[in-house]
Image: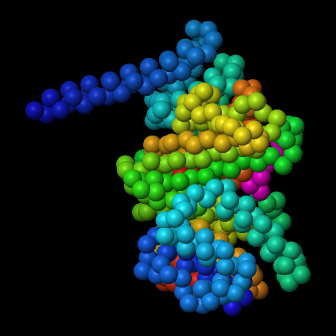
Amino acid sequence: MECSTWQEEFQIWLPEALEGGSQTAPPAELAEHARSCPACGPRLEAARLILEGSVEPTAPAGLADRIMTRVHERADERDRDRFGAGPPADGRTRRRAVRRPAWFVAIGAGAAAMVAVIFAAGMLVGRATNSDATASRAEAAEVIRVEFRLVAPDARGVAVVGDWNGWDADADRLADPDGDGVWEGTVVLRRAGEYEYQFLIDDERWMPDPESPLTVDDGYGGRNSILNI
Amino acid sequence: MRSVAVLAGLILLLATAGAGAQDLDSVLARASYSQPERAAIRRRIELAEARGIDPELLLPRVAEGVAKRAPAELLEEAVASEITRLEAARDLIVESDAAGLVADRPSWLRAANLLDAGFRSETVRRLARASADRIEAFRPGSLLLTLLTEWGLDETAAATLAAATIDSRLATEEFPGLLDLLIAGRARRITPADMTRRLLDALPHVRNLRGLRRAVL
Protein backbone atom coordinates (compact mmCIF):
# COMPACT_ATOMS: atom_id res chain seq x y z
CA MET A 1 0.00 0.00 0.00
CA GLU A 2 1.28 3.46 -0.90
CA CYS A 3 1.37 6.21 1.72
CA SER A 4 -1.19 8.31 -0.18
CA THR A 5 -3.68 5.44 -0.23
CA TRP A 6 -2.90 4.70 3.41
CA GLN A 7 -3.68 8.28 4.35
CA GLU A 8 -7.00 8.19 2.53
CA GLU A 9 -8.00 4.98 4.31
CA PHE A 10 -6.72 6.36 7.61
CA GLN A 11 -8.82 9.52 7.23
CA ILE A 12 -11.91 7.39 6.76
CA TRP A 13 -11.18 4.95 9.57
CA LEU A 14 -10.13 7.40 12.30
CA PRO A 15 -13.30 9.55 12.48
CA GLU A 16 -15.43 6.42 12.60
CA ALA A 17 -13.28 4.95 15.36
CA LEU A 18 -13.39 8.22 17.31
CA GLU A 19 -17.15 8.22 17.13
CA GLY A 20 -17.16 4.82 18.75
CA GLY A 21 -17.90 2.82 15.65
CA SER A 22 -17.59 -0.90 15.63
CA GLN A 23 -14.18 -0.82 14.01
CA THR A 24 -11.99 0.78 16.66
CA ALA A 25 -9.03 -1.39 15.71
CA PRO A 26 -7.37 -0.25 12.50
CA PRO A 27 -7.98 -2.39 9.43
CA ALA A 28 -5.24 -4.99 8.88
CA GLU A 29 -3.86 -3.30 5.77
CA LEU A 30 -3.50 0.00 7.65
CA ALA A 31 -1.69 -1.66 10.54
CA GLU A 32 0.56 -3.63 8.22
CA HIS A 33 1.71 -0.60 6.26
CA ALA A 34 2.18 1.46 9.44
CA ARG A 35 4.47 -1.18 10.92
CA SER A 36 7.03 -0.70 8.17
CA CYS A 37 6.50 2.98 7.32
CA PRO A 38 8.34 5.63 9.35
CA ALA A 39 5.91 8.32 8.15
CA CYS A 40 2.58 6.57 8.71
CA GLY A 41 3.57 4.52 11.76
CA PRO A 42 3.66 7.43 14.21
CA ARG A 43 0.28 8.63 12.96
CA LEU A 44 -1.35 5.32 13.68
CA GLU A 45 0.35 5.21 17.06
CA ALA A 46 -0.97 8.69 17.87
CA ALA A 47 -4.45 7.61 16.83
CA ARG A 48 -4.19 4.56 19.09
CA LEU A 49 -3.22 6.73 22.05
CA ILE A 50 -6.18 9.01 21.43
CA LEU A 51 -8.57 6.09 21.12
CA GLU A 52 -7.22 4.51 24.29
CA GLY A 53 -7.73 7.80 26.10
CA SER A 54 -4.05 8.19 26.94
CA VAL A 55 -4.06 11.62 25.34
CA GLU A 56 -6.87 14.04 24.65
CA PRO A 57 -7.48 15.04 21.07
CA THR A 58 -7.09 18.80 21.23
CA ALA A 59 -6.05 19.48 17.68
CA PRO A 60 -6.12 23.19 16.89
CA ALA A 61 -9.00 24.17 14.67
CA GLY A 62 -6.93 26.09 12.17
CA LEU A 63 -4.78 23.03 11.69
CA ALA A 64 -7.21 21.38 9.29
CA ASP A 65 -7.23 24.47 7.10
CA ARG A 66 -3.48 24.76 7.12
CA ILE A 67 -3.03 21.12 6.27
CA MET A 68 -5.59 21.39 3.50
CA THR A 69 -3.87 24.49 2.15
CA ARG A 70 -0.59 22.59 1.97
CA VAL A 71 -2.33 19.63 0.37
CA HIS A 72 -3.88 21.93 -2.23
CA GLU A 73 -0.58 23.58 -2.94
CA ARG A 74 1.07 20.24 -3.49
CA ALA A 75 -1.84 18.95 -5.53
CA ASP A 76 -1.73 22.14 -7.60
CA GLU A 77 1.95 21.62 -8.28
CA ARG A 78 1.29 18.09 -9.44
CA ASP A 79 -1.76 19.07 -11.45
CA ARG A 80 0.06 21.80 -13.31
CA ASP A 81 2.00 18.95 -14.89
CA ARG A 82 -0.99 16.67 -15.29
CA PHE A 83 -3.93 18.87 -16.20
CA GLY A 84 -2.40 22.26 -16.97
CA ALA A 85 -3.85 25.02 -14.82
CA GLY A 86 -5.89 23.77 -11.88
CA PRO A 87 -9.11 25.24 -10.58
CA PRO A 88 -10.60 27.77 -10.37
CA ALA A 89 -11.78 27.11 -13.90
CA ASP A 90 -13.44 30.52 -14.16
CA GLY A 91 -10.22 32.36 -13.43
CA ARG A 92 -11.61 33.75 -10.19
CA THR A 93 -9.15 34.74 -7.53
CA ARG A 94 -8.94 32.20 -4.77
CA ARG A 95 -9.81 33.23 -1.28
CA ARG A 96 -7.04 32.22 1.04
CA ALA A 97 -7.44 31.67 4.72
CA VAL A 98 -4.37 33.68 5.63
CA ARG A 99 -4.72 37.41 5.43
CA ARG A 100 -1.88 39.55 6.66
CA PRO A 101 -2.53 43.25 6.96
CA ALA A 102 0.51 45.41 6.39
CA TRP A 103 0.86 46.42 10.02
CA PHE A 104 0.73 42.80 11.00
CA VAL A 105 4.29 42.43 9.74
CA ALA A 106 5.35 44.92 12.37
CA ILE A 107 4.11 42.60 15.08
CA GLY A 108 6.37 39.85 14.00
CA ALA A 109 7.30 38.03 10.86
CA GLY A 110 5.69 34.64 10.61
CA ALA A 111 3.01 35.60 13.04
CA ALA A 112 -0.05 33.42 12.87
CA ALA A 113 -3.15 32.69 14.84
CA MET A 114 -4.91 29.47 15.50
CA VAL A 115 -8.30 28.66 16.84
CA ALA A 116 -8.96 25.31 18.37
CA VAL A 117 -12.39 24.10 19.19
CA ILE A 118 -13.01 21.40 21.73
CA PHE A 119 -16.50 20.28 22.41
CA ALA A 120 -17.19 19.02 25.88
CA ALA A 121 -20.42 17.57 27.17
CA GLY A 122 -19.52 16.19 30.55
CA MET A 123 -16.78 14.22 28.91
CA LEU A 124 -14.42 15.40 26.26
CA VAL A 125 -15.80 14.69 22.85
CA GLY A 126 -12.90 16.35 21.08
CA ARG A 127 -12.73 16.70 17.35
CA ALA A 128 -10.24 18.43 15.13
CA THR A 129 -12.02 21.15 13.26
CA ASN A 130 -11.53 24.75 12.21
CA SER A 131 -12.82 28.12 13.19
CA ASP A 132 -15.42 28.03 10.49
CA ALA A 133 -16.62 24.62 11.50
CA THR A 134 -20.14 23.90 12.55
CA ALA A 135 -21.26 21.86 15.53
CA SER A 136 -24.62 20.20 15.12
CA ARG A 137 -24.85 18.66 18.54
CA ALA A 138 -27.60 19.43 21.03
CA GLU A 139 -26.77 22.79 22.48
CA ALA A 140 -28.30 22.46 25.92
CA ALA A 141 -25.77 20.08 27.43
CA GLU A 142 -22.83 21.41 25.53
CA VAL A 143 -19.99 23.57 26.67
CA ILE A 144 -17.79 24.74 23.87
CA ARG A 145 -14.21 25.58 24.62
CA VAL A 146 -12.42 27.60 22.00
CA GLU A 147 -8.68 27.92 22.20
CA PHE A 148 -7.21 31.03 20.65
CA ARG A 149 -3.59 31.44 19.82
CA LEU A 150 -1.74 34.35 18.26
CA VAL A 151 1.95 34.64 17.52
CA ALA A 152 2.82 38.25 18.33
CA PRO A 153 6.37 38.49 19.71
CA ASP A 154 6.35 42.27 20.03
CA ALA A 155 2.98 42.54 21.75
CA ARG A 156 2.72 43.57 25.39
CA GLY A 157 -0.81 42.21 25.70
CA VAL A 158 -3.36 40.42 23.55
CA ALA A 159 -7.09 39.96 24.02
CA VAL A 160 -9.67 38.18 21.92
CA VAL A 161 -12.77 40.29 21.73
CA GLY A 162 -16.07 39.40 20.09
CA ASP A 163 -19.80 38.99 20.12
CA TRP A 164 -19.73 36.37 22.88
CA ASN A 165 -18.11 38.66 25.44
CA GLY A 166 -19.92 41.86 24.46
CA TRP A 167 -16.71 43.19 22.93
CA ASP A 168 -15.24 43.56 26.40
CA ALA A 169 -11.48 43.86 26.00
CA ASP A 170 -10.91 42.67 29.56
CA ALA A 171 -13.04 39.54 29.35
CA ASP A 172 -10.74 37.18 27.44
CA ARG A 173 -7.09 38.11 27.73
CA LEU A 174 -4.56 35.79 26.19
CA ALA A 175 -1.39 34.94 28.08
CA ASP A 176 2.22 34.35 27.16
CA PRO A 177 3.66 32.99 30.40
CA ASP A 178 6.89 31.64 28.89
CA GLY A 179 7.57 34.79 26.87
CA ASP A 180 7.93 32.99 23.56
CA GLY A 181 5.64 35.42 21.76
CA VAL A 182 2.81 32.92 21.44
CA TRP A 183 -0.30 34.27 23.15
CA GLU A 184 -2.87 31.69 24.16
CA GLY A 185 -6.14 31.43 25.99
CA THR A 186 -9.35 29.43 26.15
CA VAL A 187 -12.80 30.89 25.87
CA VAL A 188 -15.85 29.01 27.09
CA LEU A 189 -19.00 29.48 25.06
CA ARG A 190 -22.37 28.43 26.37
CA ARG A 191 -23.97 27.84 23.02
CA ALA A 192 -23.08 27.17 19.43
CA GLY A 193 -23.56 30.04 17.06
CA GLU A 194 -22.12 32.51 14.62
CA TYR A 195 -19.75 34.93 16.32
CA GLU A 196 -17.69 37.84 15.02
CA TYR A 197 -14.38 38.60 16.70
CA GLN A 198 -10.98 40.26 16.43
CA PHE A 199 -7.72 40.25 18.32
CA LEU A 200 -6.84 43.40 20.24
CA ILE A 201 -3.13 44.00 20.64
CA ASP A 202 -1.75 46.30 23.30
CA ASP A 203 -5.26 47.64 23.85
CA GLU A 204 -5.02 49.70 20.67
CA ARG A 205 -4.56 47.63 17.53
CA TRP A 206 -7.41 45.53 16.18
CA MET A 207 -6.78 42.69 13.79
CA PRO A 208 -8.79 39.83 12.33
CA ASP A 209 -7.64 36.27 12.86
CA PRO A 210 -5.17 35.65 10.02
CA GLU A 211 -6.26 32.02 9.91
CA SER A 212 -9.99 32.64 9.69
CA PRO A 213 -11.44 31.42 6.38
CA LEU A 214 -14.31 33.88 6.48
CA THR A 215 -14.17 37.57 7.34
CA VAL A 216 -16.78 40.30 7.04
CA ASP A 217 -16.76 44.09 6.99
CA ASP A 218 -17.01 45.30 10.59
CA GLY A 219 -18.50 48.68 9.66
CA TYR A 220 -15.66 50.45 11.46
CA GLY A 221 -13.00 50.28 8.79
CA GLY A 222 -11.78 46.77 9.48
CA ARG A 223 -12.81 43.16 9.07
CA ASN A 224 -14.11 40.75 11.66
CA SER A 225 -13.34 37.06 11.66
CA ILE A 226 -16.17 34.58 11.90
CA LEU A 227 -16.31 31.82 14.46
CA ASN A 228 -18.97 29.40 13.27
CA ILE A 229 -19.46 26.56 15.73
CA MET B 1 -58.08 31.64 32.31
CA ARG B 2 -57.33 32.87 28.82
CA SER B 3 -57.05 36.48 30.02
CA VAL B 4 -54.55 35.37 32.68
CA ALA B 5 -52.45 33.73 30.00
CA VAL B 6 -52.62 36.86 27.83
CA LEU B 7 -51.66 39.01 30.81
CA ALA B 8 -48.75 36.72 31.61
CA GLY B 9 -47.64 36.91 28.00
CA LEU B 10 -47.80 40.71 28.05
CA ILE B 11 -45.81 40.86 31.27
CA LEU B 12 -43.22 38.57 29.73
CA LEU B 13 -43.05 40.72 26.61
CA LEU B 14 -42.65 43.90 28.64
CA ALA B 15 -40.00 42.28 30.80
CA THR B 16 -38.13 41.15 27.69
CA ALA B 17 -38.36 44.58 26.08
CA GLY B 18 -37.18 46.16 29.31
CA ALA B 19 -34.23 43.83 29.51
CA GLY B 20 -33.23 44.67 25.93
CA ALA B 21 -33.42 48.40 26.56
CA GLN B 22 -31.39 48.02 29.72
CA ASP B 23 -28.69 46.16 27.82
CA LEU B 24 -28.47 48.88 25.21
CA ASP B 25 -28.32 51.55 27.89
CA SER B 26 -25.58 49.77 29.77
CA VAL B 27 -23.58 49.36 26.58
CA LEU B 28 -23.98 53.00 25.61
CA ALA B 29 -23.10 54.05 29.16
CA ARG B 30 -19.58 52.81 28.52
CA ALA B 31 -19.12 55.46 25.82
CA SER B 32 -18.93 59.21 26.08
CA TYR B 33 -21.67 59.91 23.57
CA SER B 34 -23.94 62.87 24.13
CA GLN B 35 -27.60 62.37 24.98
CA PRO B 36 -28.77 63.30 21.44
CA GLU B 37 -26.26 60.85 19.98
CA ARG B 38 -27.47 58.07 22.26
CA ALA B 39 -31.04 58.89 21.41
CA ALA B 40 -30.28 58.66 17.68
CA ILE B 41 -28.70 55.23 18.10
CA ARG B 42 -31.59 54.05 20.26
CA ARG B 43 -34.09 55.35 17.70
CA ARG B 44 -32.31 53.48 14.92
CA ILE B 45 -32.59 50.25 16.89
CA GLU B 46 -36.23 50.83 17.75
CA LEU B 47 -37.04 51.37 14.09
CA ALA B 48 -35.27 48.14 13.24
CA GLU B 49 -37.26 46.35 15.94
CA ALA B 50 -40.44 47.61 14.35
CA ARG B 51 -39.25 45.98 11.14
CA GLY B 52 -38.74 42.65 12.84
CA ILE B 53 -35.04 42.84 13.75
CA ASP B 54 -34.54 41.86 17.38
CA PRO B 55 -32.38 44.45 19.22
CA GLU B 56 -30.33 41.56 20.55
CA LEU B 57 -29.03 41.02 17.04
CA LEU B 58 -27.79 44.60 16.90
CA LEU B 59 -26.34 44.95 20.39
CA PRO B 60 -23.04 43.28 19.44
CA ARG B 61 -22.44 45.91 16.71
CA VAL B 62 -23.13 48.69 19.23
CA ALA B 63 -20.84 47.08 21.79
CA GLU B 64 -18.20 46.65 19.11
CA GLY B 65 -18.42 50.31 18.14
CA VAL B 66 -18.09 51.38 21.76
CA ALA B 67 -15.11 49.06 22.24
CA LYS B 68 -13.48 50.47 19.11
CA ARG B 69 -14.16 54.00 20.30
CA ALA B 70 -16.07 54.78 17.13
CA PRO B 71 -17.67 58.21 16.83
CA ALA B 72 -21.42 58.07 17.38
CA GLU B 73 -22.10 58.88 13.75
CA LEU B 74 -19.98 55.96 12.54
CA LEU B 75 -21.58 53.63 15.08
CA GLU B 76 -25.00 54.64 13.84
CA GLU B 77 -23.90 53.93 10.26
CA ALA B 78 -22.53 50.54 11.27
CA VAL B 79 -25.82 49.64 12.95
CA ALA B 80 -27.73 50.80 9.87
CA SER B 81 -25.49 48.68 7.69
CA GLU B 82 -26.05 45.67 9.97
CA ILE B 83 -29.81 46.18 9.72
CA THR B 84 -29.57 46.34 5.93
CA ARG B 85 -27.58 43.14 5.63
CA LEU B 86 -29.83 41.28 8.07
CA GLU B 87 -32.89 42.39 6.13
CA ALA B 88 -31.30 41.40 2.84
CA ALA B 89 -30.48 37.95 4.19
CA ARG B 90 -33.97 37.56 5.65
CA ASP B 91 -35.62 38.57 2.38
CA LEU B 92 -33.50 36.12 0.48
CA ILE B 93 -34.27 33.31 2.92
CA VAL B 94 -37.99 33.98 2.82
CA GLU B 95 -37.94 34.13 -0.99
CA SER B 96 -36.31 30.72 -0.87
CA ASP B 97 -39.25 29.30 1.12
CA ALA B 98 -36.91 28.57 4.02
CA ALA B 99 -38.32 30.90 6.68
CA GLY B 100 -37.27 28.45 9.38
CA LEU B 101 -33.72 29.67 8.88
CA VAL B 102 -34.71 33.12 10.10
CA ALA B 103 -36.05 31.59 13.30
CA ASP B 104 -32.65 29.96 13.78
CA ARG B 105 -30.55 33.06 14.43
CA PRO B 106 -27.12 31.53 13.76
CA SER B 107 -28.40 30.43 10.35
CA TRP B 108 -29.78 33.87 9.62
CA LEU B 109 -26.49 35.47 10.64
CA ARG B 110 -24.65 32.88 8.58
CA ALA B 111 -26.64 33.80 5.48
CA ALA B 112 -25.85 37.47 6.07
CA ASN B 113 -22.17 36.69 6.53
CA LEU B 114 -22.02 34.63 3.35
CA LEU B 115 -23.47 37.53 1.38
CA ASP B 116 -21.10 39.93 3.09
CA ALA B 117 -18.15 37.68 2.28
CA GLY B 118 -18.97 37.99 -1.42
CA PHE B 119 -20.99 34.88 -2.20
CA ARG B 120 -23.68 35.51 -4.78
CA SER B 121 -27.33 35.76 -3.77
CA GLU B 122 -28.14 32.80 -5.97
CA THR B 123 -25.59 30.68 -4.11
CA VAL B 124 -27.06 31.49 -0.70
CA ARG B 125 -30.57 31.02 -2.08
CA ARG B 126 -29.72 27.52 -3.30
CA LEU B 127 -28.34 26.53 0.09
CA ALA B 128 -31.33 28.02 1.89
CA ARG B 129 -33.76 26.23 -0.40
CA ALA B 130 -31.97 22.94 0.14
CA SER B 131 -32.07 23.48 3.91
CA ALA B 132 -35.76 24.34 4.13
CA ASP B 133 -36.56 20.91 5.55
CA ARG B 134 -33.19 20.38 7.20
CA ILE B 135 -32.37 23.63 8.92
CA GLU B 136 -29.58 22.17 11.01
CA ALA B 137 -27.73 21.39 7.78
CA PHE B 138 -27.56 24.97 6.54
CA ARG B 139 -24.45 26.04 8.41
CA PRO B 140 -22.53 22.80 7.83
CA GLY B 141 -23.54 23.07 4.17
CA SER B 142 -22.26 26.63 4.05
CA LEU B 143 -19.03 25.47 5.68
CA LEU B 144 -18.63 22.95 2.87
CA LEU B 145 -19.29 25.73 0.38
CA THR B 146 -16.53 27.81 1.97
CA LEU B 147 -14.08 24.92 1.98
CA LEU B 148 -14.78 24.07 -1.65
CA THR B 149 -14.37 27.62 -2.89
CA GLU B 150 -11.26 28.07 -0.75
CA TRP B 151 -9.90 25.01 -2.47
CA GLY B 152 -10.59 26.56 -5.84
CA LEU B 153 -13.82 25.04 -7.06
CA ASP B 154 -15.87 27.67 -8.85
CA GLU B 155 -18.77 29.03 -6.85
CA THR B 156 -21.52 27.54 -9.00
CA ALA B 157 -20.09 24.02 -8.80
CA ALA B 158 -19.43 24.43 -5.07
CA ALA B 159 -23.00 25.59 -4.46
CA THR B 160 -24.42 22.71 -6.49
CA LEU B 161 -22.34 20.24 -4.54
CA ALA B 162 -23.15 21.80 -1.17
CA ALA B 163 -26.88 21.86 -1.92
CA ALA B 164 -26.80 18.23 -3.06
CA THR B 165 -24.96 17.30 0.14
CA ILE B 166 -27.59 19.02 2.26
CA ASP B 167 -30.23 17.10 0.31
CA SER B 168 -28.42 13.81 0.90
CA ARG B 169 -28.56 11.44 3.86
CA LEU B 170 -25.01 12.26 4.92
CA ALA B 171 -24.66 13.35 8.53
CA THR B 172 -23.71 17.00 8.85
CA GLU B 173 -20.41 16.05 10.49
CA GLU B 174 -19.45 14.26 7.30
CA PHE B 175 -19.95 17.23 4.99
CA PRO B 176 -16.32 18.41 5.02
CA GLY B 177 -15.36 14.90 3.90
CA LEU B 178 -16.44 15.79 0.37
CA LEU B 179 -13.38 17.97 0.05
CA ASP B 180 -11.21 15.02 1.04
CA LEU B 181 -12.82 13.00 -1.73
CA LEU B 182 -12.16 15.71 -4.30
CA ILE B 183 -8.53 15.80 -3.21
CA ALA B 184 -8.29 12.02 -3.30
CA GLY B 185 -9.78 12.12 -6.78
CA ARG B 186 -7.18 14.59 -7.98
CA ALA B 187 -4.45 12.41 -6.57
CA ARG B 188 -5.83 9.67 -8.83
CA ARG B 189 -5.85 11.96 -11.85
CA ILE B 190 -9.60 12.49 -11.78
CA THR B 191 -10.32 16.11 -12.63
CA PRO B 192 -12.36 18.17 -10.17
CA ALA B 193 -15.08 18.55 -12.78
CA ASP B 194 -15.33 14.78 -13.21
CA MET B 195 -15.24 14.21 -9.46
CA THR B 196 -18.00 16.77 -9.03
CA ARG B 197 -20.15 14.91 -11.53
CA ARG B 198 -19.47 11.59 -9.79
CA LEU B 199 -20.34 13.06 -6.41
CA LEU B 200 -23.57 14.59 -7.69
CA ASP B 201 -24.57 11.27 -9.23
CA ALA B 202 -23.77 9.28 -6.10
CA LEU B 203 -25.01 11.59 -3.33
CA PRO B 204 -28.72 10.73 -3.61
CA HIS B 205 -27.97 7.02 -3.29
CA VAL B 206 -25.54 6.79 -0.38
CA ARG B 207 -26.05 6.89 3.37
CA ASN B 208 -22.62 7.95 4.58
CA LEU B 209 -19.20 9.16 3.54
CA ARG B 210 -17.77 5.68 3.32
CA GLY B 211 -20.47 4.69 0.87
CA LEU B 212 -19.89 7.87 -1.10
CA ARG B 213 -16.20 7.14 -1.32
CA ARG B 214 -16.88 3.64 -2.62
CA ALA B 215 -19.18 5.06 -5.25
CA VAL B 216 -16.91 7.75 -6.62
CA LEU B 217 -13.36 6.41 -6.33
In the image, the segment drawn in magenta is A96-101
Q: Quadrant of the N terminus of chain B?
A: top left
Q: Nearer the viewer, residue A40 or A75?
A: A40
Q: Nearer the viewer, residue B217 or A64?
A: A64
- The residue depicted at 71 percent of the width and 76 percent of the height is B183
**B30 above or below B156?**
above
- The residue depicted at 36 percent of the width and 27 percent of the height is B16
Quadrant in the rendering for residue A128? bottom right
The majority secondary structure of the magenta stretch comes to loop
- The residue depicted at 54 percent of the width and 62 percent of the height is A55
Q: Position of residue B182 (x, y in %)?
A: 68, 76
Q: Position of residue B69 (x, y in %)?
A: 69, 21
- The residue depicted at 45 percent of the width and 43 percent of the height is A190
Residue lying at the far top in this picture: please name it: B35
Q: Is residue B55 visible?
A: yes
Q: Is residue B139 visible?
A: no
Quadrant in the rendering for residue A6? bottom right
**Colour basis:** rainbow
Quadrant in the rendering for residue A178? top right
Residue A98 inside the magenta-drawn segment: yes
Q: Position of residue A136 (x, y in %)?
A: 46, 58
Residue A99 inside the magenta-drawn segment: yes
Is residue A140 shown left or right of residue B63? left
Q: Position of residue B29 (x, y in %)?
A: 55, 14
